[in-house]
Amino acid sequence: MSKAKSLVALAKSDDIQANVTRVFDLMGGVTNVIRKGTTVVLKPNAGHAEPPETSVCTNPEVVRAVIREVKKAEPAKIIVAEAAAIGCNTMECFKVSGIQAVAEEEGVELIDIKKDKDLVKVAVRGFRSNIDSIKLPRFLLEADHLINLPILKAHASMVFSGALKNIKGVVQDKVHMDMHKQNLTMAMMDVWSVCKADINIMDAHRAASGYSPHMPVPIDTHMILGSKDPVAIDRVACEVTGIDTQGVDYFKVAEETGLGNYDMEQIDVVGDSVKDCYKKMWIPYIGDMSTRWPEYDVRCKGGCSSCQALLAINMEELKAVNAYDENAGMTVVIGGLNEIPAKIPDEKIVLHGNCTKKYLKDHPNAYHILGCPPNEPALYLTIQRHETIDGTGDQEDEIIRPCMARDAQVWRDYVFEKFEEYKKENPEAK
């Protein structure tokens, strides 16, 4: 029996509301996908306190457009809900991103998932990570419809972030931290197994290229995508922006778990064509990592796409903060298929990620950064400070966030300079 095809709606124009309406119409019309008198939860990406022009969070006007479209179906209630990134205040993120103002103007409820006390423990049957159960808000589980509203962006922890990754924001900090400790890709799939979105509407109005999520370079893509299939919508998002999906490990896992279709032959794109909408994104997380920084001994056999992406952002950030040359000669190890010669001194070795723990047997005093994947700036801070920085204990508040704030402007200047160089070499990205 052949596998059913997935439909992905694609609309491109300067008018966000027109794009959202068209996408819903292409999926059968909002009154056919949303039942009258129901409770509808919208889950945007509002993980960090950044304004709309940065493209860190879902564009508030996309949120508004979806709210107005959903209202046509006459739901009983619309809720906008999010759990911001670890260490971030969700309500502050709502406010700075512009989503709070939209919710107030449109008369819908805002909920901070982190502060919700009415949690239900849900077993994850056949779990693939370290997450055998998850506590989720009762309102989320009892909602009639869940609409996933990701923004299309490059991402240091995943190479690319879209519909699949955005559902990670339905859990509170403890579960979020547990997800990073073992295998984030598998944990994402476990969350999807107990919290599936009915519809995915992707904000690709101004996609976030570059060293996103913390230092994106927004590009004018002017697209909205929609699908009931999170795998298919993410695949089409990659096709329309030139992202090499072979460098995104989680697609294979998502298809294996039955979440959706990855093969383009199993996906029907309706509305505008991929060819007509194509806009090349700058994704510096994909490519040969072993030779990109010849001043360092980079060993990345067996490294997943997540750790390779983190390797790219951290090595470049070392350059931005002028700590690259002074630490040249360090051995950086990601992945579990490497060999580390005994002659290399332990103090010259940085082991990045849980899968490199085994190398401590022969190099017990090497710097070992925990996580799967580790904290995003952990590698460059470990090399720069000559101490293991992985976010454990009080490091997140006492070291990591202050250092990120300190280095933000110089890092921003560096990233935008590199983007200008990229555009000169890639005219299709202009």
Image (spheres, helix red, strand yellow):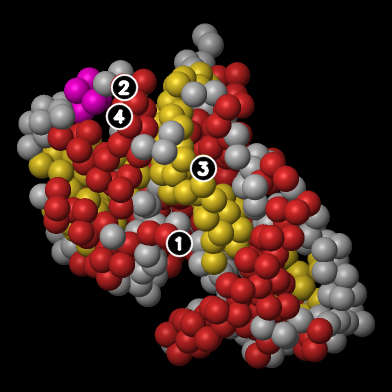
Residue 259, numbered circle: none
Residues at marks 4 and 2 touching, judged by CB atoms closer than 8 Å:
yes
The CA distance from mark 2 to mark 1 is 29 Å
| Left/right of residue 265 with respect to residue 337 in the rendered view | left
Instruction: Name the residue beneath numbered marker 3.
Output: 221
Q: Main secondary structure of the magenta part?
A: helix
Q: Secondary structure at mark 3?
A: strand
- Along the polypeptide, which appears first: circle 1 or circle 3? 1
* Amino acid carrying mark 2 in the image: Asp
Q: Secondary structure at mark 4?
A: helix
| Left/right of residue 63 with respect to residue 246 in the rendered view | left
On screen, residue 54 above or below 151? below
Q: Secondary structure at mark 1?
A: helix
Instruction: Name the residue beneath numbered marker 2.
Output: 25
Residues at marks 2 and 1 touching, judged by CB atoms closer than 8 Å:
no
* Amino acid carrying mark 3 in the image: Thr
Nearest to the observer: residue 91 or residue 383: 91
Nearest to the observer: residue 201 or residue 338: 201
Residues at marks 1 and 4 touching, judged by CB atoms closer than 8 Å:
no
Q: Residue at x 78, y 60 (%)?
A: 289
Q: Secondary structure at mark 2?
A: helix
Residue 21, numbered circle: 4
The stretch of residues the image draws in magenta is 30-34
Residue 54, numbered circle: 1
Q: Residue at x 80, y 89 (%)?
A: 326
The CA distance from mark 4 to mark 3 is 17 Å
